[in-house]
Image: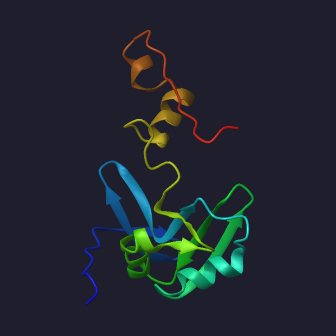
Amino acid sequence: SAPRLAVPKLLPRGNVAVPLHQEGRKAYEPDRIFIGGLPPTCDTAALALFFSQFGPVVDSSVKSKGFGFVRFENAEAVELALLNDSSNIIDGKWVRVKRCELAGSSVAGSSVAGLRSSVAGGGAASAAGSNQSTGVWIRGLP
């Protein structure tokens, strides 16, 4: 039988609220996965076909640097793809499947929104008269 999933919060998406998955300070898209280490032979159709074994695929994309994304019709498919970890093999190559982190959900323990307000408006450090500077972490730079 399939594992039962607890859905703690809702995240608005347009006019529809979708479940939000959280672990610690990070929030994840409930119906989307990141796939790393894709073989060069894998295209969008092959990616969708492989992951359709876990549930209906709404959208898939393959990026040129060997990674891709899949969005499912439901969050249960994400859980099944994650549970299949050691058997996620496409064209003879094991691929890493992870949850998709929501943009701005967490950076070094602080929210990106909080960093933006600190940088743009001076934030609490300026209001308190502190000389500490605010740092911003940027991931994925070439």
Q: Position of residue 59 (x, y in %)?
A: 63, 78
Above/below status of 114 relative to 30:
above
Q: Position of residue 112 (x, y in %)?
A: 49, 41
Which residue is at a point 72% across and 64% down the rendered structure image?
A: 40
Q: Position of residue 18 (x, y in %)?
A: 43, 75
Which residue is at a point 43% across and 45% down the rendered structure image?
A: 106
Q: Is residue 57 left or right of residue 12?
A: right
Of all residues, the one furthest to the front in this rendering is 92
Q: Is residue 45 left or right of residue 118?
A: right
Above/below status of 114 relative to 121:
below
Q: Is residue 14 visible?
A: no
Quadrant of the frame with the N terminus:
bottom left
Which residue is at a point 29% across and 73% down the rendered structure image?
A: 7
90, 70: nearer the viewer: 90
Q: Is residue 109 left or right of residue 120?
A: left
Above/below status of 2 relative to 107:
below
41, 50: nearer the viewer: 41
Hey, which quadrant is residue 90 in on the image?
A: bottom right
Q: Position of residue 45 (x, y in %)?
A: 70, 81
79, 135: nearer the viewer: 79
Quadrant of the frame with the C terminus:
top right
The total number of labels drawn is 0
Q: Is residue 50 visible?
A: yes
Q: How is the image coloured?
A: rainbow
